[in-house]
Image (cartoon, grey):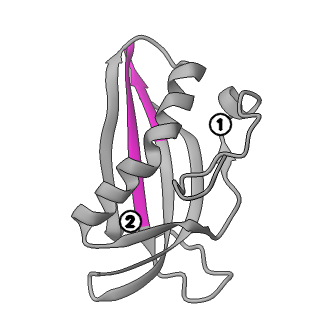
Amino acid sequence: MATISVYKQFFEAEGCFNGRDRHGAQVMLISDSDAGQFRYEASISFIPHDDKEDFAVSYDAYFTEVMFEGKGRRSKKREIQLLEKLGDHIEKLADRSGGKVFLNKPLTKPSYDKLIQNEINFVFSLDKQKSV
């Protein structure tokens, strides 16, 4: 199975998981493929982020939700459409997990897979309050 990080970015967050306060979150759009089947997942990993240099990802507070599943192959168009919906999925996933991700407070710049990097010729933001 091939797993690709289509998009990744860190944001301010809050929550308490396994007795540990979390102040940041890694948000990702992940693509998995195997034998002609593709799946895209939204994921959140709540991290301690105790200081501005602390981006250690812990997987004890990791949550995912399938956004799309089907036969075929990766598509730039589909990935951009999924990115446009990612913010809503992340907010719902964070609510269900008992945490909160502040999509209007990024801690890092976004990182994109090379398949779509050149297709994104606009400032993409998961924050619905911000114009793109």
Residue 99 belongs to magenta span: no
For disc 2, the marked residue is 59
Side of 94 relative to 131 (left or right):
left
Residue 45 numbered mark, or none:
none
The magenta segment is 30-45
Name the kind of residue labelled 1 in the image: Asp
For disc 1, the marked residue is 113
Principal SS element in the magenta part?
strand
| Quadrant (top left, top right, bottom left, bottom right) of the N terminus | top left
Residue 45 found in image quarter: bottom left
Residue at the spot x=52%, y=39% of the render?
Answer: 83
**Looking at the picture, does residue 42 appear above or below residue 24?**
above
Name the kind of residue labelled 2 in the image: Tyr
In percent of width and height, residue 128 lies at 51, 54
In percent of width and height, residue 4 lies at 53, 36
Give the camera-side residue of 20 and 7.
7
Side of 35 relative to 5 (left or right):
left
Question: Secondary structure beneath disc 2?
Answer: helix
Residue at the spot x=50%, y=29% of the render?
Answer: 81
Crowding at mark 2 (Cα within 10 Å: few <14, some 14-19, many 20+): few
Mark with earlier residue (1, 2) = 2
Give the camera-side residue of 123 and 12.
123
Residue 32 belongs to magenta span: yes
- The label nearer to you, 1 versus 2, is 1
- Alpha carbon separation for disc pair 1 and 2: 22 Å
Residue at the spot x=61%, y=57% of the render?
Answer: 130
**Looking at the picture, does residue 132 appear above or below residue 54?**
above
